[in-house]
Amino acid sequence: MSQYLIKRLAFSLPTLLAISIIIFLILALAPGDPMSEFATNPSITEEVRENIRKSLGLEQPIYIRYFKWLLAFIQGDMGYSFTSRSPVSTIILQRLPTTLWVVGLAYVVGILIAFPLAILSVIKRFSWIEQAITTFSLLGFSLPTFFTGLVLIIIFNVQLGWFPSFYNSTLIVDSFSSFVEQIKQSIMPIMVLAFYQSAMLMRFIRSAILDEVNEEYVRTAYAKGLSYFAVFKHIIRNAMIPVVTLIALDIPAIFTGALITEQVFRVPGIGSLLIDSIYRSDTPVVMAITFIYAILIVIFNLIADLTYGWLDPRVRY
């Protein structure tokens, strides 16, 4: 196990290095200028803009800028935002709690919905229950999140007036009433994301379970007289191997937030920060978010591989 872990880590470092180079080149060569916001300001002369460009290091060659960024990132310094001049790490940490609260909670709710419904649809195959669950998953997987969000806004805000349509980022939770308001403004974005995530996971889990039902060991277990639920326990464990990969690769996506849903409900999460930074050509912020996401993908992919050994005793490292 330790040798496998060392090999994977040794392979992951060049992978992350290549990813960082590709991301940096794409952002450096992409159209857009961080100084474009100053171009329409008559009080800022061309000389001042050039001085600002030099202070940001934009006049240096791309490879020098990359090596400076890489060395700073290794030391924990993500640089400064081109637009706000604030440390990138501070900006991300300000948005991270909201993203974890909304997107993270929605993913947990989605998992709690997907597993029981997927198992129930397999147990109740060829019944109206399976048809209802399949229809639910088909709708959740097919409908785009912006459409579902707009429908919920029309129903629960415009018609019923139960929940606010936009997320209040200035709300401070310091009492029970403010906590209730926090819950109310989080319900609709969480519902939208949980609906989509549960539908996607449920289809995948159901397919993985059905693949195991027809395996030889299942028929052998029934032939030996094992009960249905005893056999189903082994089916679930073996079916979890591909599901673990899906969940492990989905968890890092929580960090980047929900790009569309955050825009619909004005949630000040990392997803909206990423969109705004791309629009403003704020390269340090975009670079930090995308590269941290790549690091999380590599880490959780390794965790998924190590989990295989626990789920399937045949897997040895």
Image: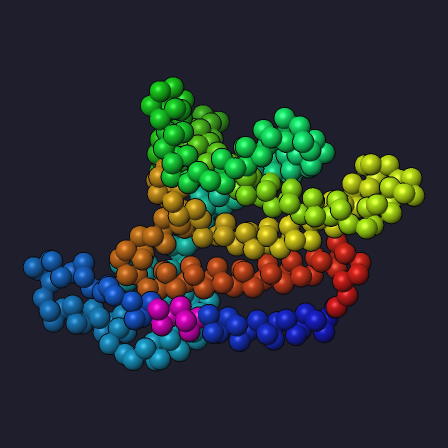
Q: Nearer the viewer, residue 102 or 176?
A: 102
Looking at the rendering, the stretch of residues picked out in magenta corresponds to 20-26
Where on the picture, by quarter, is residue 163?
A: top left
Look at the image and tell me whether residue 178 can be seen: no
Residue 215 left/right relative to 127: right
**Quarter of the image where the C terminus is located:** bottom right
Q: Position of residue 139 (x, y in %)?
A: 49, 35
Q: Is residue 6 magenta?
A: no
Prevalent SS, magenta region: helix
The quadrant of the picture occupied by the N terminus is bottom right
Which residue shows up at 16% across the image and 60% down it? 38
Q: Residue furthest right?
A: 224
Tell me, yes or no, if residue 197 can be seen here. yes
Q: Is residue 46 left or right of residue 103?
A: left
Left or right? Give the position of 154 relative to 177.
Answer: left
Q: Residue at x 38, y 19 (%)?
A: 160
Residue 269: percent from left, percent from top: 40, 46
Give percent across and percent down for residue 229: 81, 36
Which residue does the image show at 36% across and 54% down from the upper left?
Answer: 274
In the rendered image, residue 21 lying in the magenta stretch gets the answer yes
The front one of 234 and 287 is 234
Q: Is residue 71 above or below residue 313?
A: below
Using the image, determine if residue 168 lies above or below residue 17.
Answer: above
Image height of 185 relative to 268, above or below:
above
Q: Residue at x 28, y 74 (%)?
A: 57
Point out residue 164 in the picture as x, y percentages from the top left corner.
37, 28
Label count reads 0
Among the 4 quarters of the image, the one containing residue 60:
bottom left
Q: Pick the residue in front: 223 or 65.
A: 223
